[in-house]
Image (cartoon, helix red, strand yellow):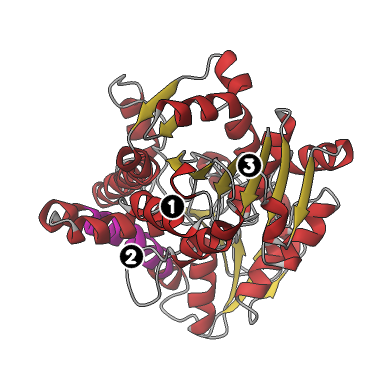
Amino acid sequence: MLVSVIGTGYLGATHAACLAACGHDVVGVDSDPGRIEPLEHGRAPFHEPHLDELLDRGVRAGHLRFSTDVHDAAGAEVHFLCVGTPQRTGSRAADISAVHAAAAALAPLLTRPCLVVGKSTVPVGTARELATRLRRDAPAGEDVHVAWNPEFLREGHAVEDSLRPDRLVFGVEADEDDQVLRDVYVEMINGGVPVVRTDLATAELAKVSANVMLAARISLVNLLAEVCEAAAADIGDLTTVLGLDERIGPHFLSPGVGYGGGCLPKDTRAFVARAEELGVAGPAALLRDVDAINMRQRARTIDWTVALLDGRVQGRRIAVLGAAFKADSDDVRDSPALDVAATLQARGADVVVHDPKAAANAARAKPGLRIADGVEAACQGAEVVLVLTDWEEFRGIDPVSLLDVVARPQVLDGRLTLDPHKWRAAGWDFHALGRGAR
């Protein structure tokens, strides 16, 4: 099939590459030349494991091309809307202006029957509004159909999640639209991926609801971790016990400095905003507490760091290991690690940050921060070391060799990444969110 993907950010570039890998002819369109230029050469403008290989293969095979001209999307049988929906400035609600702009640019080109498929995370009700506008403005009129096909990508695992998803959700209004999407994803469906066919509104709610559930689970675990600290208990052992309960399971039971990134924080807030618009403000207040607990983790990390420095951070050297919001990503959007580092620097601390992949993005986001090329360089002369992103390479740090680098052997593990027994045995004053003194 000839498919267009409007928007080539994290979602769109990955989706385009994976559709081409499934045998479709794909054109990705974006108004930002800075995104398109590397994509045209088979490279992603961000870090995502295995994506460059997929992009390069698609471009070389001629199944995948990119453009800044939306007219290159004309003639496609299916158009996927993959633009960003960030938090609206001055509000908790989602900013869906890019979705409407993409649809408005596409409408005059829709001269024959086609399916416009939303993948962006939007407030429920957006799809029907888009359908009305497209049928009004497109030359094909009523022959333009709208469907919603939410994404469930995890940064660091996006290629796997795209090629071998655990479910496909089709929000459609007609059998023919369902069949078109089945044709798009035929390879995955034949491979056994389950399909949930539903209405537009339910499909719109699918991704944001999943993120709300995950956010609530993470904040609940962080609440348990704080109680463990107060009671001199160990959150690691506690989550092992909880994870063995088949009703709960072991996933997303890792406490720490909190969630971040471009999805969970803004989607949780947007869900609350839309629930309030729909008259469900009372129950939705629960999610305000979820958000508050998450942000509290950052404040607690900062307070603990200040305490380790005897209440004074002015001019004190602090090493921060991690800038990305999670491992295997260079994404620093709403990153707890970067927020903690920047806040400590704003209080007068001498902060040095190291991240294996997100250093350049961290420097752009927080130009005043000092960035180091490696762990030892970041820790040189540090009076406290903060581990704030769960990179696998941080687990392998040798605490003995690092003793000769730091000024004071103090470490605060904000991701339960390090082995406390190993670090304490090496002579470190070891602290971790959710762990007692033992």
User: Is 297 contained in the magenta span?
Assistant: yes
Main SS category, magenta section: helix
Query: Quadrant of the rendered structure where residue 266 is?
Result: bottom left
Q: Pick whichever, 304 or 83, lies toward us.
A: 83
Q: Could you tell me which quadrant the C terminus lies in? A: top left
Residue depth check, mark 3 versus mark 1: number of the one nearer the observer: 1
Residue 98 visible: yes
User: Which residue position is annotated with label 3?
Assistant: 15
Nearer the N terminus, badge 1 or badge 2? 2
> Mark 2 packing: few (<14 Cα in 10 Å), some, or many (20+)?
many
- The label nearer to you, 1 versus 2, is 1
Q: Closest to the observer: 188 or 437?
A: 188
Q: Earlier in the sequence, mark 3 or mark 1?
A: 3
Q: Label 1, on which residue?
A: 135
Q: CA distance from mark 1 to mark 2?
A: 26 Å
Identify the magenta region: 287-302
Q: Quadrant of residue 17?
A: top right
Task: Please give the name of the residue rendered at 66% of the width and 40% of the height, measured from the top-left corner.
Answer: 3
In the rendered image, residue 306, in percent from the top left (x then y), is placed at 43, 73
Please say if 287 is above or below 171. Answer: below
Question: N-terminal of the two: label 3 or label 2?
Answer: 3
Residue beneath label 2, please? 93
Give the residue type at disc 1.
Answer: Arg
Q: Is residue 396 visible?
A: no
Q: Amino acid at mark 3?
A: His
Picture layout, residue 339 above or below residue 314: above
Determine the secondary structure under disc 1: helix
Q: In the depicted view, which residue is nearer to us: 233 or 285?
A: 285
* Cβ–Cβ under 8 Å for marks 1 and 2: no
